[in-house]
Image: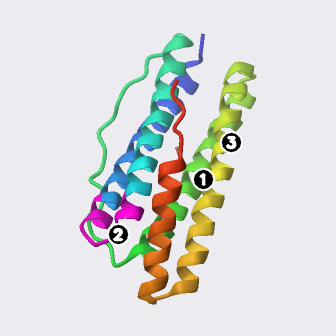
Amino acid sequence: MISKNLEKAINVQIMNEEHSSRIYMAMASWCETNALPGAAEWLYKQSDEERMHMLKFVKYLNDRGGYAILSKLDKPTPDFKNLHEIFEQVLKHEQFVTSEIHKLYELAMNEKDYSTENFLQWYISEQVEEESVANAILDKLKLVGNDKAGMFHIDKELAAQAAAKVIDTI
Ligand code: FEO
């Protein structure tokens, strides 16, 4: 049976993952209406992936005798300047999620909840991957600056990445 403390902390993380999903959907919608169809696909996929991250926590918490509950979420901003700004925000957001996962892991360690520690290992690896992917895209965006041909190329590349991405199911 999971402790009340961990149950509360995991419910906060369920909120964080669902919020991530909505933030990325808002970004996808902006890209879709600003001639960036590849970036839109990439962000829609990312939004789906965050929902899966949320669901994984929901199932785990309920399996361990806790109760997963959903929270009220802040409205994601619909206003962006450009794709560069979007990916800066993606990276910043993923860094925030990483720190939240690490805090959760620390709590599980302090409580000697080995099952939760084991469960969280997947998220720890996933965050390394997510930060690295966001960083790589941001580097390319910095390189092309305002060059329209370069931006067109990046958008195509994001479309290919989105098409190749397989989202785990649980
Ligand atoms: Fe589920 Fe991208 O953090």
Q: Image quadrant of residue 71?
A: top left
Q: Element under label 2?
A: loop
Residue 87 within the segment the image draws in magenta = no
Q: Element under label 3?
A: helix
Q: Rounded to the nearest whole Å, what is the CA distance between mark 3 and mark 2?
A: 31 Å
Region of the chain picked out in magenta, as a range: 29-40
Q: Residue at x 47, y 41 (%)?
A: 49
Q: Earlier in the sequence, mark 3 or mark 2?
A: 2
The answer to whether mark 2 and mark 1 are in CB contact below 8 A is no
Q: Residue at x 30, y 57 (%)?
A: 26
Disc 1 marks a residue whose amino acid type is Glu
Q: Element under label 1?
A: helix
Q: Is residue 121 above or below residue 22?
A: above
Task: Find out if the beta carbon at label 1 lies less than 8 Å from the nearest ligand 1 atom.
Answer: yes
Q: Position of residue 78 (x, y in %)?
A: 26, 64
| Residue occupied by mark 1 | 130
Of the two numbered discs 2 and 1 in the rendering, the one whose residue sits closer to the viewer: 2
Assign the N terminus to one quadrant of the image: top right
Q: Residues within 10 Å of mark 2 (few under 14, many from 20)?
A: many
Q: Residues within 10 Å of mark 1 (few under 14, many from 20)?
A: some
Q: Is residue 8 above or below residue 22?
A: above
Numbered badge on residue 36: 2
Q: Residue at x 61, y 76 (%)?
A: 139
Disc 3 marks a residue whose amino acid type is Ile
Q: Position of residue 35 (x, y in %)?
A: 29, 72
Q: Earlier in the sequence, mark 3 or mark 1?
A: 3
| Residue occupied by mark 3 | 124
Q: Is residue 27 left or right of residue 113?
A: left
Q: Position of residue 38 (x, y in %)?
A: 40, 63
